[in-house]
Amino acid sequence: MIPSRGRCAFLVSICALAASTLLLPCLADDYAQQNITVTPGYKLLPGIASVPAPVRVAPDQDWMGIDGSWNTFSLLIGDPQENVRVFVSTASQQIWAVNRLACVSNVTDPSTGQVTQMNVLDSDCETSRGNLYNNTASDTWHTKGYYQLWLEKNLGLVGNGLYGFDTVGLGMAGEKGPSVQNTTIGTLVTPNFWLGHVGLHPKPTNFSAFEDPIPSYMTDLFTQKSIPSLSFGYTAGAQYHGQTVLASLTLGGYDTSRIIPNDLTFIFAPDNERDLVVGLVGLSATTASAQNVDLLKRDDVTMLIDSTVAELWLPVEICKAFEDAFGLKYDADTDLYLVNDTLHKTLVASNPTVTFTLGQKYSTDTTLQITLPYAAFDLQASPPYRGLQEKTSYFPIRRGNESSQWVLGRTFLQEAYLTVDWERQNFSVSAIDWTFGREANLTPIVSPAYAVQEYDPPKKPGLSTAAIIGIAVGGGFVFALTMCAIGWWFWRRRHKRNLEAIKAKYEAEAAAAAAAKKDATEKSDEPPTSPIHDSEEGTRVFPKAELPGDSAVHHEMGTDLKDKEPMVISEADNAERQIYEMPGDMPERQEAGGRQLSEKETMVVRERIYNGFDPNGTPDVSPMVEEPPRRLAPISPSEVTMVNSRLPSNTNVSPVTPRTPRDGAFLETSDTFFQLPPYRPPRDGRPAEDTLLSPISPLEGSTDTSRRRFSYES
Ligand SMILES: *[C@@H]1O[C@H](CO)[C@@H](O)[C@H](O)[C@H]1NC(C)=O
Ligand SMILES: *[C@@H]1O[C@H](CO)[C@@H](O)[C@H](O)[C@H]1NC(C)=O
Ligand SMILES: *[C@@H]1O[C@H](CO)[C@@H](O)[C@H](O)[C@H]1NC(C)=O
Ligand SMILES: *[C@@H]1O[C@H](CO)[C@@H](O)[C@H](O)[C@H]1NC(C)=O
Ligand SMILES: *[C@@H]1O[C@H](CO)[C@@H](O)[C@H](O)[C@H]1NC(C)=O
Ligand SMILES: *[C@@H]1O[C@H](CO)[C@@H](O)[C@H](O)[C@H]1NC(C)=O
Ligand SMILES: *[C@@H]1O[C@H](CO)[C@@H](O)[C@H](O)[C@H]1NC(C)=O
Ligand SMILES: *[C@@H]1O[C@H](CO)[C@@H](O)[C@H](O)[C@H]1NC(C)=O
């Protein structure tokens, strides 16, 4: 029992602790930057005592969208702060918010045609689009001008926006995250993007070729020391797993509580508009009528993981395979797979599943399976999405004519967790651990600017610390035992000699006594028995105890893993399914000529149709995205020519950024291009051999080099 005075002090300190943890942040309502000193897997560089902690961005409770229902995140923009709801874009580097103009209209008197009320706000529109941002109401807004939105132009989602700079904070009042001052904001009215987004890409924005590139939101967060690295972990959340599971966004790390870990790491493709690319190695459906229906009607499919869009944009052949497997019907008017009530009931009752097998050719043989139940595809589209007149169920796959249109959107990220390390240029995809109620467990990813990665020592006997200690202890023990044995042998020899001497003495004395007494008939012949003498023959070998068979141990581990990780990692046994070259996959960056003009024309038409934005007011420039200077030499088409000609000194056109040996070595020359990517330590004690890279077959090595270069990253 705690004495009463001590107990009182104890209670006071508990209260103080509670107050400081619960009340103070609420009272201050400000974000407190925190640093961490413990960085598992990373060794801080000399002179660096701590690094910023990873930031968890709290999701809202809201689910929004006209192409489904998606969990949003909050941003606080401008001064006074306006709370807007946004999605997460893994492809964008900017903050986007819906401009207030998107929901205002002039009311006209139908009889006279006269405007009776000006700029009337439609509050349903305002709510539906995640709250609006009125840039003119913000004191800290600086206008830049009208520019093309650029993002998702490959999917035909074009439009323009009023760009400027303002303060953007993550989170909402009461749960504020870090904020960035004077960051790039695109404000839009086009319904092609119904809500705004927080862009997680670190590439800068070039508004024109004559201006300095403007750092991205992520880069700003990193340089102002709010996050430990340019990296993130994200999953979209889902509402269909019995209970609602909110989205999860971590900046500068990832949340281990949400994932089933695996050993597969993907390497960036060399195009910064399409870098999070995975190979689709297998695609199968299990329906009421058939198991493992193969839907992968092409073997060259590479998919961009991009949370900006909701749907899965798949090659037309694969869409047709979906039609056959699920009884879907393509609606040419909306370009959607609309699902009527009859079909919806059938699909809900049979609950088919679709399994994606992902891999990355030339980099690894390991594959990963992500399975989506029908519930993940059971989305509802609302007007004005794709010209719909009423709310309709649809199946969120879209026809992608070209490889530049193949995208795994948010639908996929309901069942997958994406972790991206922009600095080390790799990423991983994990299946979601649907165990409810687990505490968030943020694991930092630390920038190479702060730390070097520590690799687990290879799991060979004699090299691990435990083994070394074991050997040292064992060796010492054996040595001590040997010394004891030798000592014992010497001692016993001497002891024996002493005994013999005593015995001889005794016998001599006895003989002498006998002789002296002349008692010849009663003479004793028995030698004296001593226990020591007896034990001389006593070194016995006991039957060796049987060691437990190690197969049993392995078996147990195996089932344990299986229970924890259903279907996650499987070796690709069928090599044929692995081939997925991506010929001419890279969008060619053309000169500012034709393409942009035709795009602009499309945009003009669309803007007139959709929102009456005055496209003529748009300057000729578009926010061009450029490689961030920190990127380790991504291969642009011009560089490929350069590498092909093997004249690396002739690099005036596109400066080659310094390449670190580890990450960039394989990009160096065409001969070393196919070298193995950096060694990946095994996770969870699973053997690394399974996941190491397969040698490149001579066949692949003999194909056209420029092709190879592209397909490498596929
Ligand atoms: C947090 O870490 C960064 C990077 O090491 C350092 O520059 C900064 O001073 C640290 N902040 C605090 C409050 O320790
Ligand atoms: C409403 O009318 C005013 C004046 O004609 C015009 O400037 C404004 O752009 C109109 N607003 C909309 C949303 O059409
Ligand atoms: C934006 O805010 C300003 C200043 O408060 C106001 O005058 C203007 O009408 C607002 N714009 C819209 C479109 O509501
Ligand atoms: C905000 O950033 C832009 C572009 O980097 C710059 O031109 C402008 O001067 C900055 N404004 C302030 C107030 O820092
Ligand atoms: C973006 O800016 C950088 C640095 O000023 C420049 O080298 C590059 O050419 C620009 N990119 C484009 C597409 O204009
Ligand atoms: C529902 O759609 C299916 C094809 O997707 C079609 O065969 C069926 O006739 C439709 N039913 C109704 C009632 O429209
Ligand atoms: C794909 O091609 C068809 C036919 O040419 C066209 O109607 C459709 O708009 C194209 N889709 C996209 C997304 O470009
Ligand atoms: C990136 O690669 C390193 C090793 O080079 C690995 O430790 C890390 O887990 C990878 N990151 C991701 C997000 O896969």
Image: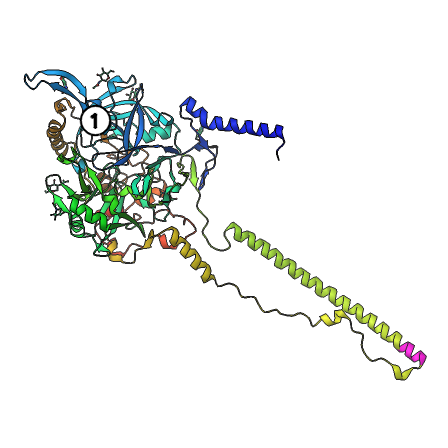
Whole-percent x and y of residue 134?
A: 24, 20
Regarding residue 583, the answer to whether it shows in the image is no
Work out which quarter of the rendered image holds the N terminus and state it: top right
Can residue 516 be found in the magenta stretch?
yes
In the displayed structure, would residue 647 be above or below residue 12?
A: below
Q: Residue at x 39, y 53 (%)?
A: 563
Whole-percent x and y of residue 379?
A: 22, 40
In the displayed structure, would residue 276 be above or below residue 225?
A: below
Which amino acid, mark 1?
Asp
Can residue 395 be found in the magenta stretch?
no
Whole-percent x and y of residue 709?
A: 25, 46
Some atom of ligand 3 lies within 8 Å of the CB belonging to the residue at label 1:
no
Whole-percent x and y of residue 476?
A: 61, 55
Local secondary structure at mark 1: helix
Of residues 377 and 137, the one drawn nearer to the viewer in this rendering:
377
Report crowding for label 1: few under 14, some 14 to 19, many 20 or more residues within 10 A (C-alpha). few
Regarding residue 132, the answer to whether it shows in the image is yes
In the displayed structure, would residue 413 be above or below residue 294?
A: above
In the displayed structure, would residue 26 be above or below residue 646?
A: above
- Magenta stretch bounds: 511-517
Quarter, ligand 7 = top left
Image-based side of 541 in relation to 61, left or right? right
Of residues 102 and 188, the one drawn nearer to the viewer in this rendering:
102
Q: Residue under circle 1?
A: 124
Main structural element of the magenta stretch: helix, strand or loop? helix
Most extreme residue toward the bottom, as rendered? 521
Most extreme residue toward the right, as rendered? 517
